[in-house]
Image (cartoon, rainbow, N blue to C red):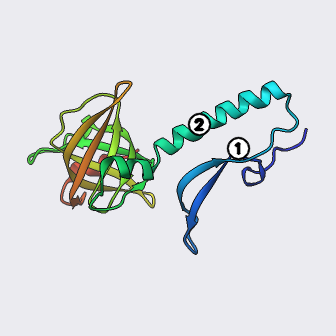
Amino acid sequence: MAEPAPVAQRPSAFAASGSVRQGDDRCKVTALTLVGEAENMPFFTQKKVHEVQSFVLKFVNSHSEVAESIELGQRRESRARLCVVALLIPYDAKTIPVHEKLPVITKEFSSTGMSVILSEPRGYDRVVVGLKYQGEMRFILARAVHLTPMGGGFFQLGLEFLQILHPGDHPELREVVF
């Protein structure tokens, strides 16, 4: 049985337009367009595939950074879309209840804040954000600035960064891992 082609060599239904910075393997995608051939498929199958590709193209482009920036207006700072696992821990000035940690998925980052996706609304005022960086846990105290319903029972929580928290100053953070 033949090995599948590496991902970079597989034909794609979409092509991204945008730019890549020299020496940076991340790219900023501005829009997707349809490309590719479906010559070996019967006509009815080609039509179905094209219909799916057309829908997905419209869907992705309607949720792109360009579309959102037009909808939201000019933001003070650009954001980087980055989907990673993070931890949220409720915070009050006296204790950090690490047993209440909640794993979340991030949506966007800026130098001053981030947004995460929650599967239920949480009434956070302040939280400790735990991120794994170069094999170590790092912690940031953040203030909740908005909780926005996304549909389907999901919510986007916007956080503003306040300060770095060091495990040496908060011993309870030493036991937090994921």
Residue identified by numbered label 2: 56
State yes or no: discs 1 and 2 in contact (Cβ < 8 Å). yes
6 relative position to 145: left or right? right
Binning the other alpha carbons within 10 Å of mark 2 as few (below 14), some (14 to 19) or many (20 upward) gives: some
Amino acid type of the residue that numbered disc 1 sits on in the rendered structure: Ala
List x then y, in percent, for residue 165.
22, 58
> In the figure, is residue 80 to the left or right of 92?
right
Q: Give the residue at x 8% y 46%.
A: 94
**Which of the 4 quarters of the picture holds residue 88?**
top left
Please tell me in which quadrant of the rendered image residue 95 appears. top left
Q: Position of residue 92 (x, y in %)?
A: 11, 44
Which label belongs to residue 13?
1
Q: State whether residue 89 is above or below residue 16.
A: above
Name the residue furthest left.
Answer: 94
Q: Secondary structure at mark 2?
A: helix
The residue sitting at 25% across, 30% down in the picture is 121
**Horizontal and vertical percent position of residue 145:** 19, 46
Which mark is first along the chain, 2 or 1? 1
Residue occupying image coordinates x 15% and y 42%: 125
**Against 88, is 137 above or below?**
below
Front residue of 103/94: it is: 103
Q: CA distance from mark 1 to mark 2?
A: 10 Å
Residues packed near mark 1 inside 10 Å, few (<14), some (14 to 19) or many (20 plus): some
Q: Position of residue 174 (x, y in %)?
A: 29, 52
> Is disc 1 placed on a helix, strand or loop?
loop
